[in-house]
Image (tube, rainbow, N blue to C red):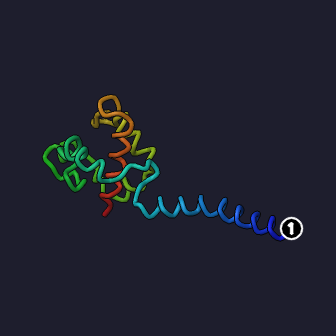
Amino acid sequence: MKLSVNRFKKTAVVTIAIPILAVVVLSRSGTQAFGAGAGDGASLFKAKCAGCHAADGSGNTPAGKSLKVRDLRSAEVQGQPDAQLYNIIAKGKGKMPAFEKTLGADKCKELVAFARTLRK
């Protein structure tokens, strides 16, 4: 009887510990809900977004100023859920073009993850 109780305790601990460990590892990795690494989107951001949004996300470029783009570092932008930022990048909004057809969903998710690194 004692052997089966010990086995049950070990199984219960493992069953509980694995999901907790996964949450801890993911939260420590600096990734967002979409799971893309910020480094993955850095060169993509530079190529596709920095012309308007600037390398630091401030929007302090001639094009960004004329289009009145949002500062990606701002609390307003950073406070939006990943899904909302993804929608804006993928589907476009106002004068911002849609990127989902040309870049694909995974690349749009990488841009969301990179945008999170631009917080003030």
Q: On the image, which quarter does residue 56 sit in? A: bottom left
Front position in the image: 9 or 112: 9
- Where residue 86 sits: x, y (%)? 40, 42
Q: Note whether residue 115 is visible.
A: no
Q: Which residue is mark 1?
A: 1
Determine the residue positioned at 32% across, 52% down: 114
- Where residue 98 sits: x, y (%)? 32, 33
| Up-down relation of residue 8 to residue 46 (above or below) | below
Q: Residue pushed farthest left?
A: 62
Front position in the image: 42 or 48: 42
Q: Amino acid at mark 1?
A: Met
Q: On the image, which quarter does residue 107 sit in? A: top left
In the displayed structure, does residue 18 sit left or right of residue 49?
A: right
Determine the residue positioned at 66% across, 59% down: 15
| Up-down relation of residue 41 to residue 104 (above or below) | below
Q: Residue pushed farthest top?
A: 101
The quadrant in which the C terminus is found is bottom left
